Structure formats: C-alpha cells, structure tokens
Image (spheres, helix red, strand yellow):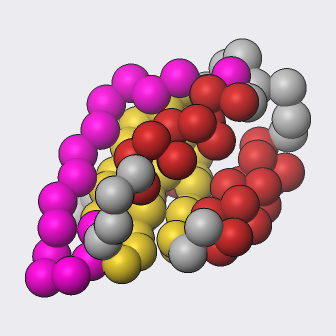
Amino acid sequence: MRAIVTVIGKDRVGIIAEVCALLAKNNINVLDISQTILQDYFTMIMMVDTAACDMPFAQMVQYLQEEGRKIGLNVHAQREDIFNAMHRI
C-alpha cells in the first residue's frame, strides 16, 4: 500500500537521513520525495510503499509520530487513497 508521509520541524542537519532511517528500519520504501525550507522550517512530503512493513498501518502511523517527536519533528502518515480523497476538488 502507498502512503503519504509529511515531516515538519525546525531546520537542522540530518533530518532527511533520520526520517529515512526510521522508514528503512521498518521496510518502508521511499517512492518520491519533495522537501523545502520555509524560513527556518524544514518541510517534506514523501510517497512511500508500506507493503513490506511488518506492523499494521495504524501502528506504523503511531510509531512514526512518536519517533518523530523524539527527534523534534512532526511526522504524519496517511494512506494515499485517503489523502487523495481529502484533496480532491
């Protein structure tokens, strides 16, 4: 299943590496990534493939939020189909 992961936090060195390490640790593959700096804030949106992840999706979402919080980031994940439905005009 594909999902959208968003990351927001105060800009610093290593954010992409830290988030990608969390994903890789759980067999979540990054399919596409876009990031930018808005003033002093790092923002990133990623499309990921969770098919090889061993934990249920809801648990994965909670894991990413908790681990992100530990490293000073707001990390949010949602299913691609839900994301698309919410952003349809």
Left or right of 55? Residue 41 is: left
Q: Is residue 54 above or below residue 23?
A: above
Q: Quadrant of the N terminus?
A: top right
Residue at image point 41% right, 55% down = 15
Left or right of 27? Residue 80 is: left
Depth check, front residue: 14 or 19: 14
Residue 64 visible? The answer is yes
Depth check, front residue: 65 or 10: 10
Q: Quadrant of residue 32?
A: top left
Q: How many numbered tags mark residues here?
A: 0
Q: Is residue 72 above or below residue 44?
A: below
Q: Quadrant of residue 83?
A: bottom left
Is residue 12 shown in magenta?
Answer: no
Left or right of 18? Residue 6 is: left
Left or right of 85? Residue 72 is: right
Depth check, front residue: 60 or 20: 20
Residue at image point 60% right, 67% down = 71
Q: Is residue 1 above or below residue 9?
A: above
Q: Position of residue 19 (x, y in %)?
A: 52, 47
Q: Quadrant of the C terminus?
A: bottom left
Please state the extent of the stretch shown in magenta in the rendering: 27-42
Q: Residue furthest top?
A: 52
Residue 84 visible? The answer is no
Q: Position of residue 29 (x, y in %)?
A: 53, 23
Q: Residue furthest bottom?
A: 39
Q: Position of residue 75 (x, y in %)?
A: 55, 64
Q: Position of residue 62 (x, y in %)?
A: 77, 61
Is residue 37 shown in magenta?
Answer: yes
Q: Residue furthest front?
A: 13
